Image (tube, coloured by chain):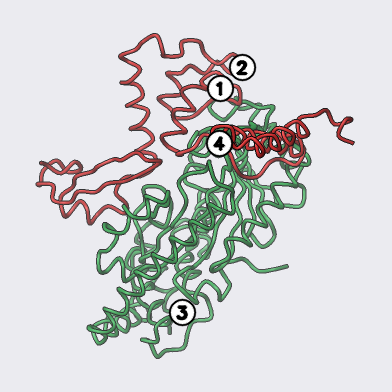
Chain colours: A red, B green
Amino acid sequence: MLCEKCKKNTATVHMQQFIGGNKTEIHLCQSCSFKMEMPISFENIFQGFLTSLQSMTANRPTRIPTTPCERCGMTYEQFKSAGKLGCEACYHTFAKEIEALFKNVQGSTRHEGKFPQRLGADLRARREADQLRRQLKEAVEAENYEDAARLRDQIRALEAPKELQS
Amino acid sequence: MSSPWFTSEKTDINPILSSRIRLARNLRKYPFQQKLNAPNAAYMVQEMQEAISIFHKLDMQNLSEAEQKVFLEKHIISPEFIRGLLPRGLLISDDQNLSVMLNEADHIRIQSMQAGDALSDALTAANRLDDLIEERMEYAFHHEYGYLTACPTNTGTGLRASYMIHLPFLERTDQFKSLLPIISKFGITLRGIYGEGTESMGGIYQISNQTTMGKTEEEIIQVLQNMTIKVMEHEAQARDKMLGTHRADQENMVYRAYGVLAYSRKITAKEAMDLLSEVRLGYLYGLLDKPKPVKQIYQIMMEIQPGHLQRIAGREMDELDRDYARAEYLREIFK
């Protein structure tokens, strides 16, 4: 096997990189491996993923989003080549593709960190309810009905209109 | 007024030179950079400059090439920011530890720097500034995805936490190829001193998180800290081995480096960085019995870069001129 970088010497160094459960392999000669600061840069992986997404969707042409973003006019093709979105609404327009990308590149599709203060209270309640719902599902599956009833009441309380809570 | 991070003694007490937090944010009312036109970009910059009035305001278009380079060499701005075509602005605190790039890859890139190992302090400062901006402007934010960024690799927290770290013994013993695949499993990456794709100089690397979703800011920092401790343990092992079996050779390298820095008449940035790396480890591990310069080694590493040299000289210089000026500057420090 030839070195993937210089394409001259025999590849003797074989490296694997794991991101979000995805494995990428790279095969290099000794001298190229010394020269590299890191096996593969993150951007390269990201671009590689977009290419693989392209070849995946190429087999199923109906799945490629054909309508551009309503707000900024960004097409899926443009996003794919630049690797950058055009506006907030693009996240909605290309939601399916972006979520697939999140799963592969980020290993998650969910933000767990900070919230803007002005949105904070409402969103925190919504997120807490989501979490309780997951626990409720587990409790029901485990036939743990006592916990399930308690969780159901908690979810109701969280989702009740504000004036009823007080 | 506190002093800039790079003048602090804390940059010279262990392998970690500095801690940095970057938060990527976008404003709700403007399209992202790919679809932003120049008039709106200029308006956005102006609006932010007015909103955050406590900082110094700079327009990139009004800075000379040398001035831009100085900011780049201090890691206050990125190469991408210099190359940008839209109107761009820079907000910067008195001590230069906090800054905001306007219209880099995102509308807003908050950056917070601290000397030594102080990521949590850097995050606290970045969060305070983030909250201040958020009181005045509305961010693009999604309840599931978090802060929305131009590139989906930053979505979520928009956080890039990094340490600037000196790893001369790992470099010398060529350990990175076995180390990198391991740390990347934890979503951590290591790269050269001036960011993406650049090679290392003087054994200095940036270690940072790659993923921005699925974890809180504190958890991301925790993982980075844990992995950095592992990397430093490897560095210490390599150091102990080299000093145990080749101490005389290591001392020789350190003293020769000192000699060249103190007496050379012409020196490239690359060579000077490598020699300063030797001298830094010489002081750190007691191999060099010479008075320590008043300036921190990392500050010297910054000031021998082309932009800084030209600023000190007060004129544009070609490469050859700079090599002479650099040697002169270093002789002054190490004489």
Q: Are marks 3 and 4 in contact (CB under 8 Å)?
A: no
Lateral position of residue B270 relative to residue A85, left or right: left
Residue tagged 1 = A90
Of badges 2 and 4, nearer the viewer stands 4
* Mark pair 3, 2: CA separation: 59 Å
Of badges 1 and 2, nearer the viewer stands 1
* Mark pair 3, 4: CA separation: 54 Å
Quick one: B61 or B150, which is closer to the camera? B150
Residue tagged 3 = B332
Dot 1 or dot 4, earlier in sequence: 1
SS assignment at label 3: helix
Q: Looking at the image, is B219 positioned above or below residue A156? A: below
Local crowd at mark 4 within 10 Å, few (<14), some, or many (≥20)? many
* Mark pair 3, 1: CA separation: 56 Å
| Amino acid found under the numbered disc labelled 3 | Glu
Q: Looking at the image, is B156 positioned above or below residue B97? A: above
| Amino acid found under the numbered disc labelled 2 | Arg
Pointer 3 chain: B
Quick one: B75 or B85, which is closer to the camera? B75
Q: In the rendering, at what x and y percent does residue A70 appear? A: 59, 13
SS assignment at label 2: loop
Q: In the rendering, at what x and y percent does residue B79 appear? A: 47, 46
**Residue located 64% across and 35% down the image:** A145
Local crowd at mark 2 within 10 Å, few (<14), some, or many (≥20)? few
Quick one: A53 or B332, which is closer to the camera? A53
Residue tagged 2 = A71
Local crowd at mark 3 within 10 Å, few (<14), some, or many (≥20)? few
* Mark pair 1, 2: CA separation: 8 Å
Whether discs 1 and 2 lie on one chain: the answer is yes
* Mark pair 2, 4: CA separation: 24 Å
